[in-house]
């Protein structure tokens, strides 16, 4: 019996001692390991679409009659189908030499399809090489088939300014003046 106990102790000690001397994963020196490539590569930053420099007219519209055609709401990017648009208005406010403004509301009566097509284009990606200039966001007020009026800005380049294609479509649109008002420096009608 004593011989069996001695043999069992020797076998148990040899297993214990051999386990202490064997390297385990945590005992391997990390400096000798080569990095294992990740199964998923690091994602590069996704391109960011530019935002317009302004979503309201540079010279605010103030005449109440003009605002019935072109409500004072921030413009959005056009993201509806052109066939749901029944009307497009363009309202402007132009400074005068006397310090007032001339505001006008016009309906687009020619080139609406080209205008909507140009405005439906996505904004370009941010470039980061931009100057601090303010250009008219070329806002158009659209009426959909339900009668809802909303404003849209021209799609923008990498600096947040209207793209040349959108500017060309805006300038090429045929307009019929619906209403015009001459205002003094305080936004009051001049009576002309």
Image (cartoon, rainbow, N blue to C red):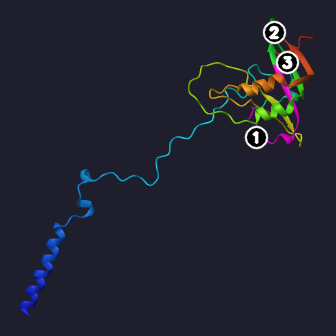
> Is 182 within the magenta?
no
Q: Determine which of the numbered discs, if any, sits on residue 169 in the image.
A: none
Residue 126's place in the image compared with 63, above or below, is: below
Q: CA distance from mark 1 to mark 2?
A: 35 Å
Q: Which residues are magenta?
A: 74-92
Q: How many circles with numbers are drawn on the protein? A: 3
Disc 3 designates what residue?
103
> What residue is rendered at 75% in x and 32% in y?
75
Q: CA distance from mark 1 to mark 3?
A: 28 Å
Give the side of residue 132 with respect to residue 24, left or right. right
x, y (%) of residue 167? 76, 24
Q: Earlier in the sequence, mark 1 or mark 3?
A: 1
Where's the C terminus, which quadrant?
Answer: top right
* Location of residue 108 by image quarter: top right
Disc 1 designates what residue?
79
How crowded is the residue under tag 1: few (<14 C-alpha within 10 Å), some, or many (20+)? few
């Amino acid at each position: 019996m004593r011989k069996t106990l001695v043999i069992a102790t020797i076998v148990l000690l040899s297993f214990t001692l051999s386990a202490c001397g064997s390297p385990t994963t945590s005992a391997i020196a990390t400096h000798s390991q080569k990095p294992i490539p990740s199964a998923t590569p690091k994602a590069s930053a996704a391109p960011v679409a530019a935002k317009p420099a302004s979503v309201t007219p540079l010279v605010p519209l103030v005449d109440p009659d003009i605002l019935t055609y072109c409500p004072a709401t921030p413009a959005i990017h056009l993201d509806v189908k052109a066939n749901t648009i029944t009307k497009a208005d363009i309202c402007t406010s132009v400074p005068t030499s006397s310090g007032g403004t001339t505001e006008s509301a016009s309906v687009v009566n020619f080139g609406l399809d080209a205008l909507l097509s140009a405005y439906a284009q996505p904004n370009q990606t941010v470039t980061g090489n931009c100057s601090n200039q303010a250009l008219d966001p070329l806002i158009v007020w659209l009426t959909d088939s339900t009668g809802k009026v909303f404003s849209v800005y021209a799609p923008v380049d990498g600096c947040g300014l209207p793209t040349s294609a959108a500017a060309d479509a805006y300038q090429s649109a045929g307009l019929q003046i619906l209403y015009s008002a001459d205002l003094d420096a305080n936004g009051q009608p001049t009576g002309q």
